[in-house]
Amino acid sequence: MKLRRLRFQSALIALSLGALALSACGPDSTKEKPLTIYLWSNALNSSFAPNLQKQFPDIEMQFVVGQNDLDFYAFMNKHGKLPDIITCRRFSLHDATPLKDNLMDLSVTEAAGQIYDRYLQNFTNAEGQIQWLPMCGEVDGYIANRALFKKHNIPLPTDYDSFVSACDKFAELGIRGFAADFAYDYTCMEILQGLSIPELMSIDGRSWRSKYESPTDAAPGLDSKVWPKAFQTMSKFLDDAKVEPTDVNLPYSKNTGAFLASECAMIRAGGGNVVAFSNYDKSWMDPVFLPYFGQNGEEWLLTYPAFQIALNKSLSENIARRDDAFRVLNYILSEEGQNGLAGGADIITYNKNVNLELSDTLSNLKEFIDANRLYIRVASNDFFRVSKEIVQRMIKREIGSTEAYALFDESLRTSPQSEPDVALTIEEGYDCVFDEAKGGNPSFSAMANTLRAKYETDVLLAQGYSFTGTTFAGEYNPTQVSNMIMPNALDAYRVELTGAQLLDHVALFVEGCGKEFTPFNKGSLPIFSGLEAKVAQANDGFEFVSATIGGNAIDPEKTYSAMFVSNANDMGPILQQEGLAFTKESKRVRDYLKAEAEAGSLTISAPTAYITVVSSETNAKAR
């Protein structure tokens, strides 16, 4: 693929670093900071965030791809820097407890009034506050290939007994009746809970959950009524479904591959998988979604929100900012917002004012929705961790149900023996706000400069979503160091470029490349290290104007060593170019940074001014 060669006027190429730092004639220092919105995944940053910004052009927003982990926000809260709006997918009130004093109570708001009461019960803390709201749900259960059942004249399961019978009959044919990707914590956790939803939704089950999610003591464990039976149910299921000890290493790709190859009749998966598999030829792949079959005769759907959302209590100190935050929140809860979140996939809405139709592929779920046989998983970090540990030991037949229950309970009640070692101490912190007066985002610049120094290249080009927020002064353990980097497969690519090629690629990072990530507001602009860029703001994005290195024009014939930091999907078109030899670093950026910190060889660099934004009118006059 050939990229267009940008032609620059020499006067613009000669933009000096001094002019860059002084040209921030936009907002003065008294201007309100943008509304900070932290997203749990880069997928939302690439699709949902641009749409949200488009809906509210009058609200200055800064989207940051944080971590899908409430411990990450607890660390931010410790340093007094919670975002204005927080989203998290892996969520439990249990893990949110350290944040509750700094989050807004939404219980009497219009937003909370839109959510069905039966779901809000799982989001009400011991003080009666509702600080988190669920944003539309995905379903989890089994997928069966009806074509394979029909081919072998085996009835499709309708209850637990017929599920077990199907597994037996397929085993006689040398075909696995059921398999699941037990290599992952979420699969271990969801099947453990999914099999016992009737008990977990009983009076005793709800009582236990209330105590666990909003604890009055430091480390609540399991109860003695519901959970012993849940582990008995799990143990029986592993035998009935013929789960093999080696399944503890079964990954998603191999599991779905076997399903698509008709080597397995049923797998654990989400509703989105059913929709995806329905695109195949129905003569050999005819997927249907099945619920978790309770061994007591009840069938339920396990669900989990696309994410949970909370607002910073400090928003109440500024009426205008508070109102802007609620405008955003209410839009996300609306039918249009929920459809935007779904991205064309089938979802279950928790909003009683929204009507979302299921596609024909998942139409059989309507009876469960109408009957309210929906269960939102318990998803604390401890539950993810301990479920994997204990369920995998059950799969390997190392422990039975009684020991599994006791070990699970003990692990939940036992605090870690020691805190992780300090891997990095940062002497000076830097704020995470795009500030034109400072030539960009100081925290992001510090991270980009740090990586360039470690990678030892002349320049570094990083996508605007690469880093996760404020650089705090203080101590970091290894996980907290890796959490400074966006979690979704951020890689580094080394390449040698001529000055002319470098200018072309700076333009690509600024202007976007086809359907891949395109900056949609100032906060989403790329981060540069080792060079300074000038960009023009246009109605539909940004245009690259010029770039310098140390205030001097970039020599189009000179060779520069460069490092590109990007998600692999967004690097696709760039990697396809002819004549450029990109070398992908062996470690992903977050793993590399963590390893350097653990080795004691990481120092955070100071930020530098790296970008100036001018209006399209100013740019036109300059030309």
Image: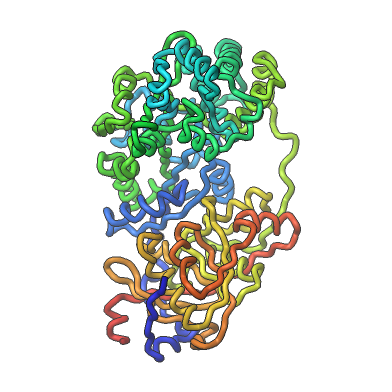
- Pick whichever, 47 or 538, lies toward us: 47
Q: Position of residue 127 (x, y in %)?
A: 47, 27
Question: Which quarter of the picture shows residue 550?
Answer: bottom right
| Residue located 53% across and 34% down the image | 255
Q: Is residue 157 visible?
A: no
Q: Position of residue 237 (x, y in %)?
A: 56, 16
Rendered-image quadrant of the C terminus: bottom left
Q: Is residue 512 visible?
A: yes
* Direction from residue 50 to residue 400 in the image, left or right: right
| Residue located 56% across and 46% down the image | 72
| Residue located 52% across and 73% down the image | 580
The type of colouring in the image is: rainbow
Q: Position of residue 284 (x, y in %)?
A: 39, 32
Q: Position of residue 177 (x, y in %)?
A: 51, 22
Rendered-image quadrant of the N terminus: bottom left
Q: Is residue 382 placed above or below 521 in the rendered structure?
A: above
In the image, farthest residue toward the top: 296
Question: Which quarter of the picture shows residue 415?
Answer: top right
Q: Is residue 48 placed above or below 496 in the rendered structure?
A: above
- Pick whichever, 539 or 114, lies toward us: 539
In the image, farthest residue toward the bottom: 10
* Direction from residue 441 to residue 116 in the image, left or right: left
| Residue located 61% across and 30% down the image | 247
Q: Is residue 30 placed above or below 501 in the rendered structure?
A: above
- Pick whichever, 566 or 240, lies toward us: 240
* Direction from residue 453 to residue 157 in the image, left or right: left
